[in-house]
Amino acid sequence: MASKPQDRSDGHYTIAKADKDIIGLGVVVAMIVLIIATGSSALADAVTALISHGQPRNQMLSAALLLNVALLMFGFRRYRDLTAEVRQRRQAEEMSRSIAQTDPLTGCLNRLTVDEALQAMITSARRTGHEVVAIVIDLDHFKRSNDVHGHLTGDAVLLEASRRIRSALPDGSIMARLGGDEFACAAIYDPDHVTAIDRLVLHINQLVARPIVIDHLSIEVTASVGLASTATEHTAEPAKLATALLHHADLAMYQAKKSGRNGYRWFDAGLERELRYRNELERGIREGIPAGEFVPYYEKQIDLDSGELTGFEMLARWKNPRRGLLSPDIFIPVAEEIGLISDLSESLIRQALSDAREWDPRLTLSVNISPIQLRDPWFAQRLLKLLQEANFPPHRLDIEITESCLHENIGMVRTLITSLRNQGIRISLDDFGTGYSSFAQLRTLPFDRIKIDRYFVSNLDSNKDSATIIGAISSLGKGLGLPITAEGIETSAVLDELRKYGSFKGQGYLYGQPSDAQSVHTMLANQNMLRGLSIDPSASTYPFQQAAAA
Ligand code: C2E
Ligand code: CA
Ligand code: CA
């Protein structure tokens, strides 16, 4: 309701003023006609009176003439005032239209107007057999610089970046600010010289990357750029084409950002396939979790001295109905990005606890936990709830967290580890050696075990550097009193070499590939290692020593 008067004023006021404009003009014209009509009679009367030396016969006529002259003057002034008012009003409207169409900070077009400009450019390019490229540019880490130096400096950086981009663009290009630190440009190009566009974008990347000096501060930003050309679009209609072009350039920009920033990427058939695959993955994960398509596989963990089986590491697998068995490297990062890692992990842990309850109670279960799950303040409670529901003793559970967790909020990680350990759960530091965790962190965080990454283990027998690193890690473990698991043992040669460095636990393809719950169950049953069945030491030890020696 409150917006009604404003609604009326914008459109209708102009029309009303224009009407008055015409009325004012009408009054003046009518006065002129009347003056001519009354004026000729009054003038004739006055002339007659002058010749006959008498009074004008019709004094009323003279008064009417004077009145008409006064009205004419009044009407003329009114007409002039109104015209000036209308002119001012038009100028103000012009200005507000320009504000609505452009970005006030940079003077570029804005998100609302870029589409229309692009459509016009596409139509005009078609006439000459040219193509149009849309270029979406997003500044990298701009938010961080904005937070550090404040918004005024941030605005100055945006302004300077926009000037540099504009200076690189050919004449007749479009430039718009889509919002925040995102710009969109478009240019007409000759399809036979598409490399000119690559050079243009490289130049833009270089220009933006030069330090921007504001108030003695030298600020460095880079840009990620995405490109889409009318040459590779499927749509023909300019309106749809303009929208598709901007959307695709935006997707390409996002990919450029993902692959390291300060670079550019074209939207092409390859990227389209990549994105389609990615969408399919995302949808598949969303639907696959409740459908039970994600299942735990188990990898044996062995005491290398005795050859005894000590437990299993649970490794996620996706039984994808269309693509077969998929590895976690494919779906875990996507599940993390789309916020489903906790749901996925909980569903797997629930299944694993139920499987492991059937095993000999001396066998442990290790599960991998993503850094993202550790950010959840309720993580410990959720895990304990799962243990409770499965009636599974906490001391049989070992959670593996990677070094990358330690770069996050270390205080929070410490609290979490401590509270989990207080419940009896054990914590291993996974992939040790790949994530640059410091000695100090190792000492202050109460880990139960470190796992040497398979990268250093699998070539231990042939690579000197790996041998040096394994030597250093084993001394570190001894010094800190931390037991060590070596992963990625593929050959008995590596196993023999490893044994020289001390007593480890180990796992790897030498002991077999990870297998599903049913195979593990059968294997354990064959060795009398299911719950309630007594363990025959020779049965449990012998097969692994044999495998190791093979
Ligand atoms: P990881 O924790 O380092 O797991 C060991 C990986 O090495 C597994 O790959 C395993 O199949 C593989 N592997 C085992 N022995 C050997 C060997 O002798 N040689 C070689 N070359 N590889 C061996 P997988 O199953 O593909 O898992 C990859 C990674 O995915 C895991 O690395 C782990 O970080 C992650 N992951 C697996 N399951 C889960 C899960 O449930 N949650 C989370 N957050 N991450 C998981
Ligand atoms: Ca692991
Ligand atoms: Ca690992």
Image (tube, rainbow, N blue to C red):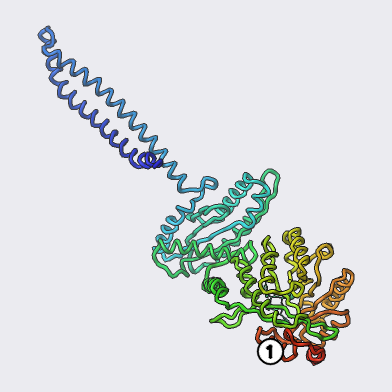
Instruction: Quadrant for the C terminus, please.
Output: bottom right
Q: Residue 98 at what x, y percent from top left?
A: 45, 45
Of 119 and 313, the residue lying toward us:
313
- Compared across the picture, whether 343 is left or right of 467 comes to left
Q: Is disc 1 surrounded by few (<14), some (14 to 19) or many (20+) residues within 10 Å?
A: few
Q: Is residue 115 above or below residue 284?
A: above
Q: Nearer the viewer, residue 525 or 475?
A: 525
Q: Nearer the viewer, residue 477 or 211?
A: 477
- Give the image location of residue 3, x and y in percent: 40, 42
Toward the top, the furthest residue is 53
Residue 458 can be seen, yes or no: no
| Percent coordinates x, y for residue 396 in the rendering | 75, 75
Type of amino acid under label 1: Thr
Viewer-proximal residue among 191 and 471: 471
User: Under tag 1, what secondary structure?
Assistant: helix
**In the image, is residue 226 above or below residue 459?**
above
Determine whether, in the image, residue 117 is placed left or right of residue 430: left
Q: Where does the N terminus fall, quadrant-wise?
A: top left
Residue 288 falls left or right of residue 132: right
Q: How many marks?
A: 1
Q: Is residue 513 above or below residue 472?
A: below
User: Based on the displayed image, in which of its 4 quarters is residue 536 positioned?
Assistant: bottom right
Left/right placement of residue 209 relative to residue 510 reads left
Residue 467: percent from the left, percent from the top?
85, 78
Residue that numbered label 1 is attached to: 522
- Cβ of mark 1 under 8 Å from ligand 1: the answer is no
